Amino acid sequence: MTANSWGLGVSKELRMVDKRMRELVDSPQEILTSVALHVIDAGGKRVRPTLAILSHHALKGKDLSGLIDIAAAMELIHSATLVHDDINDGADVRRGKKAAYKQFGLHEAIVAGDFLFARAFYLGGLFGKEIVERVAVSTTKLAEGEMMQFAHKWDAHLSQEHYLQIIEGKTAHPIKSAAEVGACLAKGSPERIRALGNYGLRIGIAFQIIDDILDITASEKILGKSTGTDLREGSLTLPLIIAMEEDKKVAKEIRAIFAKRHATDAEVEDALELVRESHAIHEATSIAEEYAEKAAGYLKKLPESTYRERLFELSQLVVSRAN
């Protein structure tokens, strides 16, 4: 899925966001610019800026310049976390391209990730306290989610509850914040800002669950990386947890992989095939659909508009990726 493939009528704004990000990472230190552009130009779903844009327009916001800046800031924060996540996970590929630290070096990637954060907070600092605080809180939650995930690396007994806590911090809170800042910039009422935040949080959870399903079911071409990355890196996801709870054979296979920590491709594929043959994919998809449905419920608090309908559509598109 490319930056403009949601089909939600915001392609023009997303192109403006990409242009703004490219402007912001222009540095006299050319290596910083090169690493940053390596990540930005790889594309991605741009769900955070998309949600900021839709939320702003749904509340009849008119501050296009501010909207592009804050949407760019949210995506730069996301890009920074991808650079650092790949280092933490030892990943080789991101979005079909070499991970930044593999392409440019470990030191260069770490500093470039910090650079992306700095450029994002330069933009964020141009806005009022309400927006700055929301972005800061979401970034804090992101770091806490990352640390919780790291603490449970190679934990073959991770519960569904702890899994949801991890993805709420790492993925859902930044998406929630994107919806809120778009709404704040439109000078929405506290009730409507809160409604869009609740929508974003649940969309974020659904989005990550579907991503974790795709890591098991999608092709490498669609993923832009190898299937089974989560299992190889010692991270239990919802479909894996459900499959282990329901089938002792699956649980035995996955625990053996976690115990070895260096399983062969054949061993990983055998375990994934057992998960695919179970009911876990269907059950995990149903849970994601429930979160998306709950998200859509919060949109009833918004005024009727084309953009509200597009937010409804986004809640469906997020989960339809698994089909």
Image: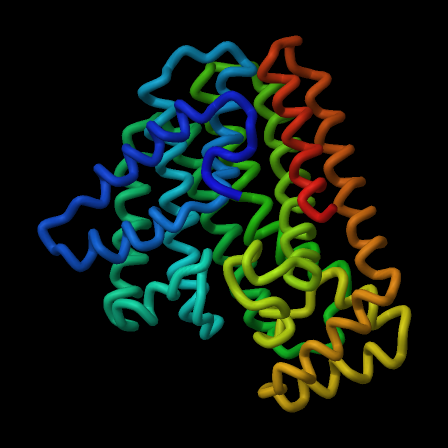
Question: Quick one: which residue is furthest to the left in this view?
Answer: 28
Model colouring: rainbow
Q: Is residue 163 above or below residue 204?
A: below
The reply to whether residue 106 is in sight is yes
Q: Is 314 on the left or on the right of 183, as rendered? A: right
Nearest the eye: 30 or 127: 30
Q: Is residue 167 above or below residue 305?
A: below
Q: Is residue 259 above or below residue 61?
A: below
Q: Is 115 on the left or on the right of 78, as rendered? A: left
Nearest the eye: 311 or 67: 311
Q: Residue at x 32, y 49 (%)?
A: 117
Q: Residue at x 28, y 52 (%)?
A: 36
Res 218 quadrant in image: bottom right
The reply to whether residue 183 is in sight is no
Query: Where in the figure is residue 238, as x and y percent of width and height?
Result: 74, 60
Query: Where in the figure is residue 211, as x and y percent of width and height?
Result: 63, 53
Q: Is 126 on the left or on the right of 226, as rendered? A: left
Query: Where in the figure is residue 7, as x and y percent of width and height?
Result: 55, 28
Res 213 quadrant in image: bottom right
Count of number-bearing discs: 0
Q: Residue at x 52, y 38 (%)?
A: 47
Query: Where in the figure is residue 40, as x and y percent of width and height?
Result: 35, 47
Q: Residue at x 75, y 59 (%)?
A: 161
